[in-house]
Amino acid sequence: MSYVAHTEEDIKSMLKAIGASSIDDLFKDIPESLRPKSFNIPAGKSEFEVSNHLKKLSRKNATGLVNFVGAGFYDHYIPAAVDAIVNRPEFYTAYTPYQPECSQGWLQAIYEYQTVICELTGLDVSNASLYDGGTALYEAAMMAIRLTGRNKIIMDSGVSLIYRTMLYTYTSNLSVEFHEIPVVHGKSSREEVLKLLDDKTAAVILQNPNFFGAVDDYSDVVEQAHKVGALVIASVYPISLGMLKSPGEMGFDIATGEGQSLGIPLSFGGPYLGFMAAKKELVRQMPGRIVGATLDLDGKRGFVLTLQTREQHIRREKATSNICSNEALCALRAAVFSSLLGRDGFKELAEHNYQKAEFAKDVFSSVSGVEVKKSSHTFNEFTVKLPRHADEIVYR
């Protein structure tokens, strides 16, 4: 809604209606000694003046710098068409369409998003979105606990520290038993995973590429986990799936991840997008909502909210999650971004990321005193040993 300032006539009319002679009367309950003598607020400026002032301020910024922070969140190129489509008034809301019969376009858009996530992960079903990568991983862990009736979680230390911290925070008042396995030469220690696996294990959580960028094929770990009845959860970086083996191909039961790289700007930390996909037999324990396609009485295709197992729709004790609103607008950005790229474009983007990171490795390796760790294949991230403390170099 546009903001329109009150006119002097409006202000006089409102003050008269409440029996006040001036705006100062509204604050007379505050002791005189506590009131500022003057706010020193200058007179308002015109739009042209404000625009020029902001331009002057923006010139002080150091622009065009390359962002090396990474850690799961990236400043990727976003096609202009993403904003053009998502900003249309028919779409520009983050809220769930509660009346499906009136919201066929929105539901179809979410359905297409779910299809994109399923194709990327190689799994059968996706939900309509979650808050971010960390909460998606937490929801997957809770799914595994409900499905297996167990409470032991084995988690790789290569999983993002942000995600691990969120998992511990969310489960701090629950009887969940976490076991972190060490990272050896940048990769998961299979020996430690197999040592901890038993019939009390609900899930094994692995990240690919992991926080250090190391890429691995976890098919063997998945097979061993399934032998003891445990589920295996993958936390993945979606762009990497343009060239890496998908979670479905490795046999994972659930895949989650952060969808920020799918057409969503960094925006000082959010809002972002959590995605989740799983095998079909696990669908009834998935959190949030799932959009499905059906046929009406006339045989026409229509879209519905097939499953809505959250506490606002069913009894709280039966709900799979207490997720409230969703990230539908961010999910739409992801769907539009992926559709614009297409299958070949997605593969090209993944290869471009890989090649740029390899080029960066070569550049860093040429710097005296800098050692690039090359114990495994990597994607986007890689580990560098510096001659001085990292903080000193980052803040130079």
Image (cartoon, rainbow, N blue to C red):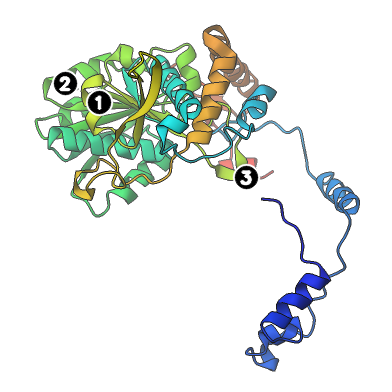
Measured from the top left, where is residue 315 in percent x and y? 22, 47
Which residue is at 43% across, 42% downward?
162
The image quadrant that residue 353 belongs to is: top right
Q: Closer to the camera, 44 or 123?
A: 44
Residue 11 appears in the figure: yes
Q: Which residue is mark 2?
A: 226
Which amino acid type corresponds to the residue marked 3 in the rendered image?
Glu
Which amino acid type corresponds to the residue marked 1 in the rendered image?
Val
Q: CA distance from mark 1 to mark 3?
A: 39 Å
Residue 383 appears in the figure: no
- Crowding near pointer 3: few (<14 within 10 Å), some, many (20+)? few
Q: Is residue 297 above or below residue 211?
A: above
Measured from the top left, where is residue 182 in percent x and y? 31, 33
Which residue is at 53% across, 35% downward?
329
Q: Nearer the viewer, mark 1 or mark 3?
A: 1
- Say which label, 1 or 3, has the lower sequence index: 1
Relative horizontal placement of residue 30, taking residue 258 as reference (left or right): right
Relative horizontal placement of residue 239, taking residue 396 as reference (left or right): left
Measured from the top left, where is residue 355 in percent x and y? 59, 13
Q: Which residue is mark 3?
A: 392
Which residue is at 28% across, 47% downward?
311
Q: Which residue is mark 1?
A: 232
Check whether the beta carbons of the residues at disc 1 and disc 2 lie within 8 A of each other: yes
- Say which label, 1 or 2, has the lower sequence index: 2
Q: Quadrant of the C terminus?
A: top right
Q: Closer to the camera, 92 or 33?
A: 92
Secondary structure at numbered mark 3: helix
Check whether the beta carbons of the residues at disc 1 and disc 3 lie within 8 A of each other: no
- Say which label, 2 or 3, has the lower sequence index: 2
Q: Nearer the viewer, mark 2 or mark 3?
A: 2
Measured from the top left, where is residue 285 in percent x and y? 23, 33
Relative horizontal placement of residue 386, taking residue 133 as reference (left or right): right
